[in-house]
Structure formats: C-alpha cells, structure tokens
C-alpha cells in the first residue's frame, strides 16, 4: 500500500476529477467463505464506552475474506486521536474507510430490468443475529451519477439479501431499500427529507427483530432521531452477514467515505 501522504493525494485527485483507472481486478469471495469468515468478531471488534455498542473491525486489505467483491481500491483516513487512546488500524472507531467503486458494480435480481447483477462491493465483517442491529455511517456528497449508492448490505446468499441506504436516481437523492427474496428484487424509495437538504452525512441502521429486518435512517449529527424506511421478512434460521456497501452501476469514479460501522442491541419496531 502507498504511504499516508500518497493516499491523501489520491483522494484529492479523485475528488477533483471523479475518475479512476478501471484496470484493477476486484476480488470475489463465496457466500460459504463469508459464513466461515467472521464468527470471530470478538477478536476483531472494539468496544466503545457503552457496552451496547461494538465498533466492528474493517480492513483496507482487498484480500481480507470479509470482502464481498472488494472495490477496485480502498484505504483508511485516520481520525485525530487523544494521546491516551491507542491507534487500532483496523477498528472503525478510529478510522474512516474509503471505497472506490468499479464502474458497472451493482446488486439487483431480475425485476423490471431483466438482469442479474451481483458484483456490488461490501465489507461483511459482522454477523447480524437475532435482536441485534448494524449501523453504518457515510457521506453522500460524492453521489452525483445515476444510481450511485451506498449503505448497509445484509446478505444470506445471492438470492436473499437486503440493501438499505441512499441512492442517487433521476437527478435526486433518495433513501432507498432493495429487498431481494427468492431471487427477485423489490425496490422502494423515499424522498430526501426537506430538512436534510444541506446535509451529507447519514447513518443507516438495520435491526433483526423476530421474523423481520427493520431499516432506518438518520442524520449523523442527530442521535436516535430515526426515519423508518422498510420492514422486510427474514427467516429465523438464516445466517446473515452485514456491513457497509457501495455500487456504481453506470459511471466510473465513484468513491464513498464510510465513518461508522457498529453492531449493537436491536430496536423494536414501535
């Protein structure tokens, strides 16, 4: 990997031009590999001051087995730390993770568009178990191309998964959920809230409660003011992995900056 200064220069270039070399090969791991990969989050996680919240490990190593379709590039942006807090290079509490998306990356199955795309980028570093939730925070200020998107991916296998987040479509940002069950995708959107017009940092949360996945969104700066996005069915026996995802179905040059990846106690629907 390049040193920190080189990485910062590359990010600055990307912000200015929004183009990236597409001649990198992205790495793909099977669902079986993910099922085995990180039922060891205990040693790959870091607790916050609250016992309820765990900052899940993430990695900029594209060979890490928790990647589902590694992006064409990724690197850390280090947060400012106090002298008393040790640096943990792979703890999401202390770093931001920037993903550079491959042009043509997407997650969709059949409905309306009559194609299957299963090459979106996701870091599935945590199991989503009963009565637990995954939260992912990120910036949407680079979402300018048709279908630019990012958020949380919850995946059982190629025919059963949910992606919840933000998508830029037809000239506007939308809060967006795609629920795919038995091989068919179902897309729902909500308008970007009027009081969010000047905001670019959001948090998406998916809770697994009983037989349901519950997707919610909030501004990063406003704690516990959640907007309900979708309630989806889920099998009680499904083995689910979850984490930050991003896709660029149409254009090249999209990068997404993720700033939060936590696993915590689930929240009831009402």
Image (cartoon, helix red, strand yellow):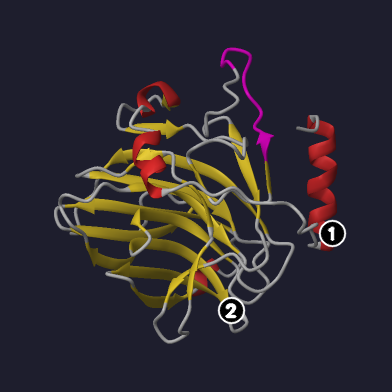
Cα–Cα gap, marks 2 and 1: 21 Å
Label 1: few (<14), some (14–19) or many (≥20) C-alpha neighbours in 10 Å: few
Q: Is residue 249 above or below residue 5?
A: below
Which residue lies under the disc numbered 1?
16
Label 2: few (<14), some (14–19) or many (≥20) C-alpha neighbours in 10 Å: some
Q: What stretch is highlighted in magenta?
A: 75-86
Occupied quadrant, residue 233: bottom left
**Considering the image in quadrants, where does the C terminus appear?**
bottom left
Which residue lies under the disc numbered 2?
172
Q: Where is residue 128 in the image (x, y as percent from the top left)?
A: 30, 44
Q: In this view, does 62 lie above or below 112?
A: above
Relative side of 38 to 259, left or right: left
Occupied quadrant, residue 41: top left
Residue at 34% in and 65% down = 159
Tell me which label, 2 or 1, sits earlier in the chain.
1
The chief SS type of the magenta part is loop
Contact between marks 2 and 1 (CB within 8 A): the answer is no
The answer to which of 112 and 36 lies nearer the viewer is: 36
**Considering the image in quadrants, where does the N terminus appear?**
top right
């Amino acid at each position: 990997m390049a040193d920190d200064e080189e990485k910062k220069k590359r990010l600055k270039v990307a912000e200015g031009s929004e183009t990236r070399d597409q001649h990198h090969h992205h790495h793909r791991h099977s669902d079986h590999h993910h099922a085995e990969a990180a039922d060891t989050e205990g040693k790959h996680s870091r607790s916050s001051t609250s016992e309820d919240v765990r900052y899940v490990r993430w990695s900029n190593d594209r060979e890490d087995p928790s990647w589902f379709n590694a992006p064409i590039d990724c690197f850390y942006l280090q947060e400012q730390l106090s002298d008393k807090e040790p640096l943990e290079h792979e703890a999401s509490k202390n770093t931001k993770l920037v993903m550079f998306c491959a042009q043509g990356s997407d997650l969709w199955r059949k409905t309306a568009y009559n194609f299957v795309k299963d090459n979106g980028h996701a870091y599935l570093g945590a199991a989503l178990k009963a009565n637990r939730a995954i939260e992912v925070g990120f910036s949407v200020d680079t979402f300018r191309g048709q279908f630019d998107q990012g958020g949380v991916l919850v995946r059982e296998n190629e025919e059963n998964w949910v992606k919840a987040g933000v998508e830029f479509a037809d000239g506007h940002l939308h809060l967006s959920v795609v629920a795919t069950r038995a091989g068919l995708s179902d897309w729902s959107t909500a308008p970007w809230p009027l009081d969010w017009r000047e905001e670019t940092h959001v948090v998406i949360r998916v809770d697994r409660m009983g037989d349901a996945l519950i997707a919610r969104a909030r501004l990063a700066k406003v704690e516990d003011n959640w907007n309900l996005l979708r309630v989806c069915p889920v099998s009680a026996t499904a083995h689910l992995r979850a984490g930050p995802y991003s896709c660029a179905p149409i254009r090249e040059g999209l990068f997404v900056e993720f700033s939060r990846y936590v696993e915590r106690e689930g929240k009831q629907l009402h």
